Image: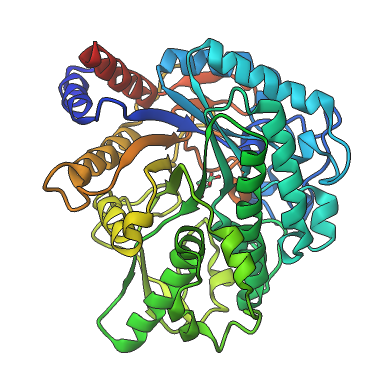
């Protein structure tokens, strides 16, 4: 821990509100491994990862971080880190192997143990019910293109609520339905690998319905924790003032942000969706009853913020490891790089001030309908070695996290651009390097380095920085 960290850490700690939550986040499929242990069923991601060329360098998720067998060690790391809360996801196929019918006692036991270990360590559990691992039999019957998946999800959510509802402090129904639709169903670069483009719309509606039904199911089970959802939010800018670029920016904003947030928070799809009507053949008649189900009162709203997006009309290549140019080339619009910012390992712009813009945008759009917010993911990958002998000096990650927290505090402080937003916490993505979906192990986002040959965990400098922040805040609170 350098002296320089010390001063900036104390400064930042002093700006965090008293009850602000500092956390770390993860997802089952990215860390657990043990894909066929303990009666877990296969997921759409298991199958997708086996397709030649689907995952960079042919990396396999089979072992990932082996968290399934090492959760006590990982919880001990979090205790050392000093975080208030851990956001993890429950693997649907681990607790209900076929996505319907019987539950798997051993899978349920795993999460029982994890939750108990967290509580014992004084860490508040935030459980996400769906972070992209759809049970394979459901994927085979259409996945999110099939309305019945929403009903199956509600049953599974009820079972999770029954089992863990006495101990989980916060429930997140879905993680980023936008990424599932865009990457998985529209562009085909994630599971289930479909290239439906605008015809993927049913996967939007059925996930939203699944969210609403799951909120009802959790509440019917009497869970004691708060219930919310996590959406990806990226403020969208047109590349120029041209009318065509502005129109395309509106469509991107709809597809990335509003088509998910509007129905959940205000109970209707955005009226400007008609702009995209020529492409949205699959946007059929939506019943009022469905919209009512989707629009449930929420205890909080989770936002994953990584980057702003700049777009222009017309086809064009955009270099990004996350979404290959070949996939985007089929769309009559393209992303344009932000030359004014540095970039992460994924090539994403590091633009913390846009976090404030995003918060302002949410409050302007949803006003009193916007529940208290948590940033449920924020973080960055940078090129880092596969093997290390001690803490690596990941100053770029420290700058990324401190920059985002700083801007979040500035924006929500009295007089800040989002002073009227009730921001309650920030979860770093992610605790440890893990299986980064189609990018395999090539993108390291962790506060803790993982050697994927030995599975050894080595905290990075950013771990000690976040620990110092957490300690500085606790000592300030007394
Ligand atoms: C997802 C994570 C992913 C991260 C970085 C988020 O959209 O929720 O699972 O690892 O982005 O790509």
Colour convention: rainbow
Q: Quadrant of residue 204?
A: bottom right
The residue lying at 53 percent from left, 31 percent from top is: 225
Q: Is residue 365 left or right of residue 284?
A: left
Query: Position of 400 compared to 168: left or right?
Result: left
Tag count: 0
Q: Position of residue 341 (x, y in %)?
A: 26, 55
Q: Is residue 30 above or below residue 337?
A: above
Residue lying at the far left of the rendered structure: 415
Percent from the top left, x then y, of residue 236?
35, 67
Residue 477 shows up from this direction: yes
- Give the percent coordinates (x, y) of residue 104: 84, 30
What residue is rendered at 16% in x and 26% in y? 11
Using the image as rendered, state which of residue 217 and residue 207 is in the foreground.
217
Query: Which of 183 and 232 lies nearest the eye of the viewer?
Result: 232
Answer left or right for 422 relative to 347: left
Task: Please tell me whether residue 10 is drawn above or below residue 436 in the rendered image.
Answer: above
Q: Nearer the viewer, residue 6 or 93?
A: 93
Q: Quadrant of the N terminus?
A: top left
Asked if residue 319 can be seen in this view, the reply is no
Q: Residue at x 55, y 43 (%)?
A: 442
Q: Quadrant of the C terminus?
A: top left
Quarter residue 378 falls in: top left
């Amino acid at each position: 821990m350098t002296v320089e960290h010390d001063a900036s850490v104390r400064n930042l700690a002093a700006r965090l509100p008293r009850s602000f939550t500092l956390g770390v986040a993860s997802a089952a499929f990215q860390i657990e491994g043990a894909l066929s242990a303990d009666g877990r069923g296969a997921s759409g991601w298991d199958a997708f990862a086996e397709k030649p060329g689907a995952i960079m360098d042919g990396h396999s998720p089979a072992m990932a971080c082996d968290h399934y067998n090492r959760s006590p060690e990982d919880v001990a790391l979090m205790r050392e880190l000093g975080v208030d809360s851990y956001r993890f996801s429950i693997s649907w196929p681990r607790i209900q192997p076929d996505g319907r019918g019987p539950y798997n006692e051993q899978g349920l036991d795993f999460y029982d143990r994890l939750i108990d270990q967290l509580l014992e360590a004084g860490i508040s559990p935030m459980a996400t019910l769906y972070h992209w691992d759809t049970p394979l039999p459901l994927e085979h019957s259409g996945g999110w293109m099939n309305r019945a998946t929403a009903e199956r999800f509600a049953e599974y959510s009820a079972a999770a609520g029954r089992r863990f509802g006495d101990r989980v402090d916060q429930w997140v129904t879905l993680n980023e339905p936008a990424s599932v639709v865009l990457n998985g169903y529209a562009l085909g670069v994630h599971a289930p690998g479909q290239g439906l483009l605008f015809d993927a719309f049913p996967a939007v509606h059925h996930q939203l319905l699944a969210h609403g039904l799951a909120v009802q199911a959790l509440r019917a089970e009497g869970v004691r924790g708060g219930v919310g959802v996590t959406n990806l939010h990226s403020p969208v800018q047109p590349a120029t003032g041209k009318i065509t670029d502005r129109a395309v920016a509106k469509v991107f904003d709809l597809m990335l942000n509003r088509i998910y947030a509007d129905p959940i928070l205000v109970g209707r799809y955005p009226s400007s969706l008609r702009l995209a009507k020529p492409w949205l053949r699959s946007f059929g008649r939506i019943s009022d009853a469905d919209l009512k189900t989707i629009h449930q009162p929420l205890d909080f709203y989770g936002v994953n913020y990584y980057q702003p997006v700049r777009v222009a009309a017309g086809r064009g290549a955009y270099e990004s490891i996350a979404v290959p140019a070949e996939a985007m080339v089929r769309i009559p619009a393209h992303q344009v790089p932000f030359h004014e910012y540095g970039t992460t390992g994924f090539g994403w712009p590091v633009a913390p001030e846009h976090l404030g813009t995003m918060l302002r945008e949410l409050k302007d759009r949803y006003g009193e309908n916007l529940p208290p917010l948590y940033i449920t993911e924020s973080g960055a990958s940078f090129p880092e070695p596969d093997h290390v002998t001690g803490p690596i000096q990941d100053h770029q990650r420290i700058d990324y996290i401190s920059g985002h927290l700083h801007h979040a505090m500035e924006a929500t402080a009295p007089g800040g651009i989002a002073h009227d937003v009730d921001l309650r916490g920030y979860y770093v993505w992610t605790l440890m390097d893990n299986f980064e979906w189609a990018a395999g192990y090539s993108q390291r986002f962790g506060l803790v380095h993982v050697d994927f040959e030995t599975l050894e965990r080595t905290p990075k400098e950013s771990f000690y920085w976040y620990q110092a922040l957490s300690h500085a805040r606790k000592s300030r609170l007394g």
